[in-house]
Amino acid sequence: MNTLPLQWVIVAGVVVIALLALAAWFFSQKKKQSARLQQRFGSEYGRTVGELGGRTKAESELKAREKRVAELTITQLAPAEAARFSQAWNALQARFVDNPKGVVLQADQLVRELMLKRGYPMGDFERRAADISVDHPTVVEHYRAAQTIAARDERGEADTEELRKAVVHYRVLFDEMLEVRDTKQEVPPAKQIPVHA
């Protein structure tokens, strides 16, 4: 009877154990990556899984977004620029009562201008929303909701209450995107000089 030498059995056993360990490590890494993406993107993760029909495709898309945004130069606004944008927003809101339809369009334009100033590319809406979702996953839903209402408004289907909601959605995104860089140095408190009697 022909038997395998003990040495070959041991080598085969080590190879099988190594392959099992490698597979366990691979699945562990995949699980960690999924958890990281879920944590980073929040509800945008689930939306992307549903839209693309599976985790593998969705995770590839989310990683591609991260890579694309990492190559962008996203900058914070100086306080003077932020003040200008804030004033423009306040003026826009003041016009809502007289022209709700126009204000929704202006809100969209102001958000786009702010995004452009920060360094986000101005491709189509889905691309902008995808880019925003990398650093601002909690507010991208507001952007999508505002755009949905704006599209309904273009078709003449949105009422004033919906337009108000659109402006509120834009405001959430606007506030998040307005991140301000403080250029002032904090002045340390003056040291107290002890008074001698």
Image: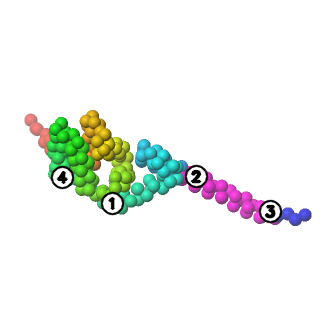
**Does residue 182 lie above or below 166 as drawn?**
below
Which of the image's four quarters has the C terminus? top left
State the SS at label 1.
Answer: loop
Residue 182, image x and y in percent? 21, 50
Residue, disc 3? 6
Using the image, tell me which numbered label, if any, was put on residue 27: 2
User: Between tags 4 and 2, which lies in front?
Assistant: 4
Residue at screen point 13% across, 42% down: 193
Q: Amino acid at mark 1?
A: Leu
Question: Which residue is at the far left?
Answer: 197
What separation in Å lies between label 3 and label 4 (alpha carbons)?
76 Å
Q: Amino acid at mark 4?
A: Glu
Crowdedness near tag 4: few (<14), some (14–19) or many (≥20) residues, C-alpha within 10 Å? some
Magenta residues span: 5-30
- Does label 4 or label 1 sit earlier along the sequence? 1
Q: Is residue 155 left or right of residue 25?
A: left
Q: Amino acid at mark 2?
A: Phe
Question: Which residue is at the far front?
Answer: 156
What separation in Å lies between label 2 and label 3 (alpha carbons)?
32 Å
**Does residue 69 lie above or below 179 as drawn?**
below
